[in-house]
Amino acid sequence: MSNVTTPVTGSQPFDISIVIVSFNTRNVLRECLEAVERESVGLKVETLIVDNNSSDGSPEMVEKDFPHVRLFRSEVNLGFGAANNVALEVAQGRYIVLLNSDAFLRPGSLRLAVKHMDERPAAGLGGARLVGRDDSWQPSARMFPSLRTDFFVYTGLAHKFPKSRMFGRFDRTWADQSEAAIVDWVPGAFSIIRAEALAKVGFFDPIFFLYAEEVDLCRRIQQAGYEIWYWPDIVVVHIGGESSRQVKSLEMSSTGAQLVLWRMRSTLLYYRKHHGPSAWGAKMLELTLYRLTAWRNRSSDDPRRQARWREQQNFITLMNRAWTETQGGRVSPPRPW
Protein backbone atom coordinates (compact mmCIF):
# COMPACT_ATOMS: atom_id res chain seq x y z
CA MET A 1 0.00 0.00 0.00
CA SER A 2 2.79 2.42 0.81
CA ASN A 3 6.47 3.02 0.31
CA VAL A 4 8.04 4.08 3.60
CA THR A 5 11.61 5.27 3.10
CA THR A 6 14.22 3.83 5.42
CA PRO A 7 17.05 6.12 6.57
CA VAL A 8 20.67 5.35 5.89
CA THR A 9 22.62 4.69 9.07
CA GLY A 10 26.13 5.96 9.57
CA SER A 11 28.13 8.37 11.68
CA GLN A 12 26.07 10.83 13.71
CA PRO A 13 28.03 14.04 14.35
CA PHE A 14 25.10 15.79 16.06
CA ASP A 15 23.26 15.18 19.30
CA ILE A 16 20.01 16.40 17.76
CA SER A 17 18.66 17.10 14.31
CA ILE A 18 15.73 19.52 14.68
CA VAL A 19 13.30 19.22 11.78
CA ILE A 20 10.68 21.93 11.21
CA VAL A 21 8.06 22.01 8.46
CA SER A 22 6.80 25.47 7.57
CA PHE A 23 3.88 26.65 5.47
CA ASN A 24 3.18 30.40 5.55
CA THR A 25 4.21 30.76 9.20
CA ARG A 26 6.94 33.42 8.95
CA ASN A 27 6.32 35.27 12.22
CA VAL A 28 5.91 32.26 14.48
CA LEU A 29 8.71 30.46 12.63
CA ARG A 30 11.08 33.25 13.61
CA GLU A 31 10.05 32.90 17.26
CA CYS A 32 10.40 29.13 17.01
CA LEU A 33 13.94 29.39 15.62
CA GLU A 34 14.97 31.95 18.24
CA ALA A 35 13.88 29.51 20.96
CA VAL A 36 15.77 26.69 19.22
CA GLU A 37 18.96 28.78 19.22
CA ARG A 38 18.62 29.56 22.93
CA GLU A 39 18.04 25.93 23.84
CA SER A 40 20.81 24.57 21.62
CA VAL A 41 23.64 26.11 23.63
CA GLY A 42 26.01 23.38 24.78
CA LEU A 43 24.52 20.75 22.47
CA LYS A 44 25.56 19.69 18.99
CA VAL A 45 22.46 20.62 17.04
CA GLU A 46 21.62 20.93 13.37
CA THR A 47 18.39 22.61 12.31
CA LEU A 48 16.64 21.67 9.08
CA ILE A 49 13.58 23.46 7.71
CA VAL A 50 11.39 22.21 4.91
CA ASP A 51 9.26 24.96 3.41
CA ASN A 52 6.04 23.74 1.80
CA ASN A 53 5.93 26.37 -0.97
CA SER A 54 5.14 29.32 1.34
CA SER A 55 4.10 32.63 -0.21
CA ASP A 56 4.60 34.84 2.88
CA GLY A 57 8.36 35.26 2.71
CA SER A 58 9.14 32.51 5.21
CA PRO A 59 12.05 30.97 3.29
CA GLU A 60 13.54 34.38 2.54
CA MET A 61 13.40 35.25 6.24
CA VAL A 62 15.20 32.03 7.14
CA GLU A 63 17.93 32.62 4.53
CA LYS A 64 18.48 36.19 5.70
CA ASP A 65 18.24 35.88 9.48
CA PHE A 66 19.22 32.25 10.10
CA PRO A 67 21.84 31.48 7.45
CA HIS A 68 23.23 28.52 9.42
CA VAL A 69 19.90 26.66 9.14
CA ARG A 70 19.57 24.12 6.33
CA LEU A 71 16.60 25.15 4.22
CA PHE A 72 14.79 22.91 1.78
CA ARG A 73 12.28 24.53 -0.57
CA SER A 74 9.50 22.46 -2.04
CA GLU A 75 7.74 23.68 -5.16
CA VAL A 76 4.47 22.17 -3.91
CA ASN A 77 2.84 21.61 -0.53
CA LEU A 78 4.01 18.10 0.35
CA GLY A 79 1.94 17.85 3.50
CA PHE A 80 3.37 17.18 6.96
CA GLY A 81 4.82 13.68 6.76
CA ALA A 82 6.35 13.83 3.30
CA ALA A 83 7.89 17.23 4.03
CA ASN A 84 9.51 15.88 7.20
CA ASN A 85 10.87 12.99 5.15
CA VAL A 86 12.83 15.42 2.98
CA ALA A 87 14.87 16.48 6.01
CA LEU A 88 14.98 13.03 7.59
CA GLU A 89 16.79 11.76 4.51
CA VAL A 90 19.84 13.86 5.41
CA ALA A 91 19.51 14.35 9.19
CA GLN A 92 22.69 13.33 11.03
CA GLY A 93 21.67 13.52 14.69
CA ARG A 94 21.50 10.52 16.97
CA TYR A 95 18.13 11.93 17.97
CA ILE A 96 15.58 13.63 15.72
CA VAL A 97 13.38 16.36 17.17
CA LEU A 98 10.25 17.11 15.18
CA LEU A 99 9.01 20.59 16.01
CA ASN A 100 6.05 22.53 14.66
CA SER A 101 6.80 26.03 13.45
CA ASP A 102 4.23 27.34 15.96
CA ALA A 103 5.83 25.49 18.88
CA PHE A 104 8.41 27.11 21.18
CA LEU A 105 10.85 25.27 23.41
CA ARG A 106 10.78 26.23 27.08
CA PRO A 107 14.11 26.51 28.97
CA GLY A 108 15.87 23.19 29.45
CA SER A 109 13.57 21.26 27.13
CA LEU A 110 16.19 19.95 24.71
CA ARG A 111 18.61 18.88 27.42
CA LEU A 112 15.85 17.08 29.28
CA ALA A 113 14.72 15.34 26.11
CA VAL A 114 18.23 14.05 25.42
CA LYS A 115 18.66 13.04 29.07
CA HIS A 116 15.44 11.03 29.10
CA MET A 117 16.29 9.26 25.85
CA ASP A 118 19.83 8.49 27.03
CA GLU A 119 18.50 7.02 30.28
CA ARG A 120 15.91 4.85 28.54
CA PRO A 121 17.38 2.87 25.64
CA ALA A 122 13.98 1.21 25.12
CA ALA A 123 12.38 4.59 24.36
CA GLY A 124 11.95 4.98 20.62
CA LEU A 125 10.02 8.24 20.75
CA GLY A 126 9.14 10.74 23.45
CA GLY A 127 6.78 13.67 23.74
CA ALA A 128 6.44 16.78 25.87
CA ARG A 129 3.79 18.55 27.91
CA LEU A 130 2.14 20.92 25.41
CA VAL A 131 0.73 24.17 26.75
CA GLY A 132 -0.67 27.40 25.37
CA ARG A 133 0.95 30.78 25.91
CA ASP A 134 -1.14 31.07 29.07
CA ASP A 135 0.13 27.68 30.26
CA SER A 136 -3.24 26.07 29.59
CA TRP A 137 -2.98 22.31 29.11
CA GLN A 138 -3.25 20.75 25.67
CA PRO A 139 -3.70 17.02 25.01
CA SER A 140 -0.13 15.76 24.97
CA ALA A 141 -0.30 11.97 25.22
CA ARG A 142 -2.88 9.78 23.57
CA MET A 143 -4.02 6.23 22.98
CA PHE A 144 -4.51 4.67 19.56
CA PRO A 145 -7.82 5.31 17.79
CA SER A 146 -10.48 2.62 17.78
CA LEU A 147 -14.13 2.57 16.78
CA ARG A 148 -15.07 2.61 20.47
CA THR A 149 -12.90 5.61 21.39
CA ASP A 150 -14.01 7.41 18.22
CA PHE A 151 -17.62 6.93 19.33
CA PHE A 152 -16.84 8.42 22.75
CA VAL A 153 -15.14 11.44 21.15
CA TYR A 154 -17.74 12.11 18.42
CA THR A 155 -20.71 11.79 20.78
CA GLY A 156 -19.17 14.10 23.39
CA LEU A 157 -18.97 11.43 26.07
CA ALA A 158 -15.20 11.91 26.30
CA HIS A 159 -15.72 15.61 26.99
CA LYS A 160 -18.59 15.05 29.43
CA PHE A 161 -16.78 12.40 31.48
CA PRO A 162 -13.08 13.30 31.21
CA LYS A 163 -12.10 11.47 34.42
CA SER A 164 -13.53 8.18 33.23
CA ARG A 165 -10.86 5.68 32.20
CA MET A 166 -13.24 4.40 29.53
CA PHE A 167 -14.68 7.61 28.09
CA GLY A 168 -11.49 9.66 28.56
CA ARG A 169 -9.22 7.01 27.09
CA PHE A 170 -8.26 8.75 23.84
CA ASP A 171 -6.71 11.88 25.39
CA ARG A 172 -5.91 10.18 28.71
CA THR A 173 -7.84 12.95 30.48
CA TRP A 174 -8.27 10.65 33.47
CA ALA A 175 -4.51 10.50 34.09
CA ASP A 176 -2.30 12.73 36.20
CA GLN A 177 -0.66 14.91 33.54
CA SER A 178 2.28 15.65 35.84
CA GLU A 179 3.40 12.01 35.77
CA ALA A 180 5.58 10.49 33.05
CA ALA A 181 4.00 7.52 31.32
CA ILE A 182 4.33 5.04 28.50
CA VAL A 183 1.57 5.90 26.01
CA ASP A 184 0.49 4.96 22.49
CA TRP A 185 1.33 8.17 20.66
CA VAL A 186 2.09 11.86 21.12
CA PRO A 187 1.07 14.83 18.93
CA GLY A 188 3.48 15.94 16.23
CA ALA A 189 3.98 19.45 17.64
CA PHE A 190 7.04 18.09 19.47
CA SER A 191 8.63 14.69 19.58
CA ILE A 192 12.14 13.33 20.01
CA ILE A 193 12.90 10.14 18.09
CA ARG A 194 15.81 7.74 18.35
CA ALA A 195 17.56 7.62 14.95
CA GLU A 196 18.10 3.91 15.49
CA ALA A 197 14.34 3.40 15.71
CA LEU A 198 13.75 5.30 12.47
CA ALA A 199 16.41 3.14 10.82
CA LYS A 200 14.30 0.11 11.71
CA VAL A 201 10.79 1.30 10.90
CA GLY A 202 11.33 3.96 8.23
CA PHE A 203 10.11 7.52 7.96
CA PHE A 204 6.57 8.89 7.79
CA ASP A 205 4.26 6.95 5.49
CA PRO A 206 3.57 9.33 2.55
CA ILE A 207 0.02 8.02 2.11
CA PHE A 208 -0.95 10.50 4.84
CA PHE A 209 -0.93 14.12 3.64
CA LEU A 210 -2.10 15.56 6.95
CA TYR A 211 -3.48 13.90 10.10
CA ALA A 212 -2.74 10.37 11.37
CA GLU A 213 0.87 10.32 10.14
CA GLU A 214 2.32 10.59 13.65
CA VAL A 215 -0.13 7.98 14.94
CA ASP A 216 1.04 5.58 12.24
CA LEU A 217 4.71 6.27 12.97
CA CYS A 218 4.29 5.73 16.71
CA ARG A 219 2.43 2.50 16.03
CA ARG A 220 5.26 1.19 13.84
CA ILE A 221 7.89 2.21 16.40
CA GLN A 222 5.92 0.43 19.11
CA GLN A 223 5.52 -2.67 16.94
CA ALA A 224 9.32 -2.70 16.50
CA GLY A 225 9.67 -3.19 20.26
CA TYR A 226 10.29 0.39 21.41
CA GLU A 227 8.38 2.40 24.00
CA ILE A 228 6.54 5.69 23.39
CA TRP A 229 6.97 8.04 26.36
CA TYR A 230 5.26 11.18 27.63
CA TRP A 231 7.57 13.38 29.74
CA PRO A 232 5.79 16.30 31.47
CA ASP A 233 8.99 18.02 32.59
CA ILE A 234 9.72 18.80 28.93
CA VAL A 235 7.46 21.80 28.30
CA VAL A 236 6.70 23.18 24.84
CA VAL A 237 4.42 26.14 24.10
CA HIS A 238 2.14 25.32 21.17
CA ILE A 239 0.02 28.22 20.02
CA GLY A 240 -1.78 26.18 17.40
CA GLY A 241 -3.68 24.27 20.07
CA GLU A 242 -4.95 20.76 19.59
CA SER A 243 -5.44 19.60 16.02
CA SER A 244 -9.13 18.99 16.32
CA ARG A 245 -10.58 15.69 15.20
CA GLN A 246 -13.54 17.63 13.91
CA VAL A 247 -14.09 21.19 12.67
CA LYS A 248 -16.92 22.64 14.76
CA SER A 249 -17.85 25.85 12.90
CA LEU A 250 -21.57 26.43 12.44
CA GLU A 251 -21.12 27.61 8.87
CA MET A 252 -18.37 25.59 7.27
CA SER A 253 -15.81 27.62 5.37
CA SER A 254 -14.04 26.22 2.33
CA THR A 255 -10.89 25.88 4.44
CA GLY A 256 -12.80 24.10 7.17
CA ALA A 257 -14.34 21.72 4.64
CA GLN A 258 -10.91 20.99 3.20
CA LEU A 259 -9.47 20.16 6.62
CA VAL A 260 -12.43 17.91 7.44
CA LEU A 261 -11.99 16.11 4.12
CA TRP A 262 -8.27 15.61 4.78
CA ARG A 263 -9.00 14.28 8.27
CA MET A 264 -11.58 11.87 6.90
CA ARG A 265 -9.26 10.60 4.18
CA SER A 266 -6.49 10.01 6.71
CA THR A 267 -8.90 8.26 9.10
CA LEU A 268 -9.94 5.83 6.38
CA LEU A 269 -6.34 5.25 5.26
CA TYR A 270 -5.24 4.63 8.85
CA TYR A 271 -8.04 2.19 9.62
CA ARG A 272 -7.53 0.28 6.38
CA LYS A 273 -3.77 0.05 6.96
CA HIS A 274 -3.94 -1.11 10.57
CA HIS A 275 -7.44 -2.59 10.98
CA GLY A 276 -8.47 -3.75 7.51
CA PRO A 277 -12.26 -4.00 7.14
CA SER A 278 -12.76 -1.69 10.15
CA ALA A 279 -12.31 1.18 7.70
CA TRP A 280 -15.91 0.54 6.67
CA GLY A 281 -16.93 0.67 10.33
CA ALA A 282 -15.14 4.01 10.75
CA LYS A 283 -17.07 5.41 7.80
CA MET A 284 -20.44 4.11 9.01
CA LEU A 285 -19.85 5.33 12.58
CA GLU A 286 -19.37 8.90 11.39
CA LEU A 287 -22.17 8.77 8.81
CA THR A 288 -24.64 7.41 11.36
CA LEU A 289 -23.84 10.12 13.90
CA TYR A 290 -24.00 12.87 11.26
CA ARG A 291 -27.36 11.61 10.00
CA LEU A 292 -28.83 11.41 13.49
CA THR A 293 -27.66 14.94 14.31
CA ALA A 294 -28.99 16.27 10.98
CA TRP A 295 -32.36 14.60 11.57
CA ARG A 296 -32.59 16.09 15.08
CA ASN A 297 -31.99 19.62 13.79
CA ARG A 298 -33.73 19.53 10.40
CA SER A 299 -37.21 20.66 11.48
CA SER A 300 -36.16 23.42 13.87
CA ASP A 301 -36.79 27.11 13.13
CA ASP A 302 -33.75 28.10 15.22
CA PRO A 303 -31.11 29.53 12.83
CA ARG A 304 -28.35 27.91 14.86
CA ARG A 305 -29.94 24.47 14.57
CA GLN A 306 -30.53 25.05 10.86
CA ALA A 307 -26.83 25.85 10.50
CA ARG A 308 -26.05 22.68 12.41
CA TRP A 309 -28.25 20.70 10.02
CA ARG A 310 -26.39 22.14 7.00
CA GLU A 311 -23.07 21.37 8.66
CA GLN A 312 -24.01 17.72 9.19
CA GLN A 313 -25.19 17.44 5.59
CA ASN A 314 -21.81 18.75 4.50
CA PHE A 315 -20.05 16.19 6.69
CA ILE A 316 -22.08 13.38 5.11
CA THR A 317 -21.11 14.58 1.63
CA LEU A 318 -17.45 14.87 2.60
CA MET A 319 -17.26 11.41 4.16
CA ASN A 320 -18.83 9.80 1.09
CA ARG A 321 -16.36 11.71 -1.04
CA ALA A 322 -13.41 10.62 1.14
CA TRP A 323 -14.53 7.00 0.90
CA THR A 324 -14.70 7.20 -2.89
CA GLU A 325 -11.44 9.09 -3.35
CA THR A 326 -9.49 6.69 -1.13
CA GLN A 327 -11.29 3.60 -2.49
CA GLY A 328 -12.33 2.71 0.99
CA GLY A 329 -8.99 3.64 2.55
CA ARG A 330 -6.93 1.64 0.05
CA VAL A 331 -5.45 4.46 -2.04
CA SER A 332 -4.05 7.86 -1.15
CA PRO A 333 -5.26 10.58 -3.55
CA PRO A 334 -2.56 12.36 -5.59
CA ARG A 335 -0.75 15.04 -3.63
CA PRO A 336 -1.05 17.87 -2.90
CA TRP A 337 -4.47 17.07 -1.47
Image (cartoon, rainbow, N blue to C red):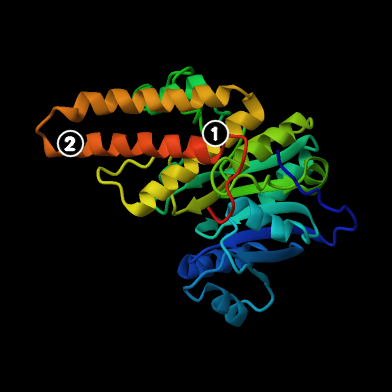
Q: Amino acid at mark 2?
A: Gln
Residue 108 x/y as whole percent = 62, 54
Residue 21 vs residue 104, the one in the foreground:
21
Q: Secondary structure at mark 2?
A: helix
Q: Is residue 110 visible?
A: no
Q: In front here: 296 or 8?
A: 296
Task: Residue under label 1, please give it.
Answer: 268
* Crowd rating for badge 1 (residues with CA inside 10 Å; few <14, some 14–19, many 20+): many
Residue found at x 42% / y 54%: 133
Q: Is residue 221 left or right of residue 297?
A: right
Please tell me which residue is depicted at 60% across the width and 58% down the height of the picture: 78
Left or right: 246, with 209 as reference point: left
* Relative side of 56 to 123, left or right: left
Residue carrying label 2 = 306
Residue 266, compared with residue 298, is above or below; it is below
Which of the 4 quarters of the picture holds residue 66? bottom right
